[in-house]
Image (spheres, grey):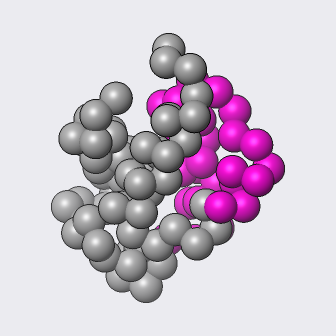
Amino acid sequence: MTRDEIITQILQFFRKEFEIENPGLDDNLREKHGFDSIDAIELLIKIENLLGSELTQEEKKRAMDIRTINQICDYIESLASVRPAN
């Protein structure tokens, strides 16, 4: 999965699930869009679906500092790099 594909998937997810149209890739999602812990859980489930595997507790903890879509994409790329290709 390329970074462009990841961005497209995440932006579609934000539009559909959170009704956030055109968030900036560097917007602070918590401050600008009211992204909360329940939203974060939904996002982690989406990430697991994209990767085709469940996240470990350690991987979930690493996600706690994510604030922007660019950081989400970096996170997914780093996880995908250590998983076997589907």
36 vs 1, nearest the viewer: 1
46 vs 83, nearest the viewer: 83
Give the residue displayed 56% in from the left and 20% down from the top.
84
Q: Quadrant of the N terminus?
A: top left
Main secondary structure type of the part rendered in magenta: helix
Q: Position of residue 75 (x, y in %)?
A: 49, 53
**Hey, which quadrant is residue 24 in on the image?**
bottom left
Left or right of 7? Residue 36 is: right
Outermost residue toward the top in this view: 86
Is residue 81 in sight in this rendering? Answer: yes
**Is 85 rendered above or below residue 21?**
above
Outermost residue toward the right in this view: 57
**Is 77 rendered above or below residue 5?**
below
Q: What range is drawn magenta here?
A: 35-62
Is residue 16 in sight in this rendering? Answer: no
**Is 49 rendered above or below residue 43?**
above
